[in-house]
Amino acid sequence: MGYLSRYHITSEPNDPALLEALNSMCMHMTFYDGGDHYYPERCKWYEYQEELTELSKQVPHLLIKVERTGEESPDVGRCWFRNGTTTGEIKPEMVWPDPPLHALASPGPDPRAEAEKLKAAALAKLTDEEKAALGL
């Protein structure tokens, strides 16, 4: 069956020559003009890095960026191509932000600390003989 991905292709500068090159070189699929980007239908395009590296030789003045989103989350990556070279697919770094602790309620009293205070107060009331009898 295969693994399907979506591709979002842009270039700097934006040049319609890229769409022409995509449709002439990658004959197994059709690319569409999305205004500021080009895209094929969701597809199995396992050789996209090799094919776009070759295609970038036809439009050496363009910096081509591809954003790929796979079927399974979080399978995403970006590649850049220019004049027969590529960065290879780069995966994003997922980083959790610091939590907004200021939005949480203030902490309540620690029950363990409260128990220690009660224990200390009770021990203070005991005589030395009572402490000895308890083994303290």
Image: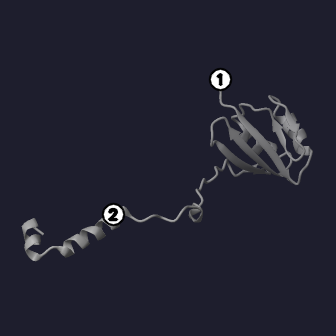
| Residue sitting nearer the eye, 73 or 7 | 73
Q: What is the residue that sits farthest to the top in this orientation? A: 1
Distance from Cα at disc 2 to Cα at disc 1: 59 Å
Q: Residue at x 60, y 62 (%)?
A: 103
- Mark 2, other Cα within 10 Å: few <14 / some 14–19 / many ≥20: few
Q: Is residue 124 left or right of residue 117?
A: left
At label 1, the amino acid type is Met
| Residue sitting nearer the eye, 126 or 49 | 126
Secondary structure under tag 2 reads: helix
Q: What is the residue that sits farthest to the right in this orientation? A: 16
Label 2 or label 1, whichever comes before in sequence order: 1
At label 2, the amino acid type is Arg
The picture places residue 109, in percent across and down from the top left corner, at: 42, 65
Can you tell which mark lies on residue 1?
A: 1
Circle 2 residue = 112
Q: Is residue 81 left or right of residue 59?
A: left
The picture places residue 104, in percent across and down from the top left corner, at: 56, 61
Image quadrant for the N terminus? top right
| Residue sitting nearer the eye, 7 or 119 | 119
Query: Where 45 sits versus 105, above or below?
Result: above
Q: Residue at x 76, y 50 (%)?
A: 81
